[in-house]
Amino acid sequence: MAYLWDKNLETGYKLVDDQHRELINAVNALNEANYAGQGSHELLEIVLFLIRYANRHFREEEALQRRFHYPEYSRHKTYHDDFKAQVNGLSKKMMGEGATPELVNEVAVFIGEWLINHIKGDDFAMAAFIQGGQYTDS
Ligand SMILES: [Fe+2]
């Protein structure tokens, strides 16, 4: 399934939104390549690109939070670290067993769902704080 980018996913902080949009596009590209029957090697390349891009995005988001002394920084970083650990496990499995359509689908669904939930919750709270909006924990 394709993930649609819309206003519901915009935090209002351009740098973060641009990177989120790229990530969603990369998940869609992975799904498309998978459905198109691309080979294991090509699929693995796309997965690795996606993971590297996600890691870079997390680093930049965390640096932004430190710069603004975001009070939820540690907790937020834990979410990123958990994501990285899970995706790492899946990519290792893929390197061992090959990027089968089932495994690729598992990775794409995991990353897609995680991103949407994380953006709408934790990243919205972060963006509200760093833009001086009303930060709320609820
Ligand atoms: Fe985040």
Image (cartoon, rainbow, N blue to C red):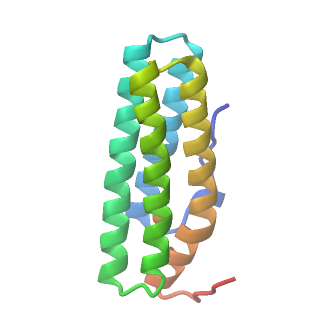
Quadrant of the image for the C terminus?
Answer: bottom right
Q: Quadrant of residue 52?
A: top left
Residue 38 x, y percent position in the rendering: 47, 12
Q: Is residue 41 left or right of residue 124?
A: left
Identity of the residue drawn at 35% across and 52% down: 55
Q: Is residue 54 left or right of residue 120?
A: left
Figure disc tally: 0
Identity of the residue drawn at 59% across and 52% down: 114
In the rendered image, the vertical position of residue 41 relative to residue 133, given as above or below? above
Identity of the residue drawn at 55% across and 22% down: 32
Residue 85 x, y percent position in the rendering: 44, 51
Residue 91 x, y percent position in the rendering: 43, 34
In the rendered image, the vertical position of residue 30 relative to residue 37, given as above or below? below
Nearer to the camera, 30 or 83: 83
Residue 99 x, y percent position in the rendering: 47, 21
Identity of the residue drawn at 39% across and 25% down: 95
In this orientation, does residue 131 appear? no
Q: Is residue 93 left or right of residue 134?
A: left
Quadrant of the image for the N terminus?
Answer: top right
In this orientation, does residue 83 appear? yes
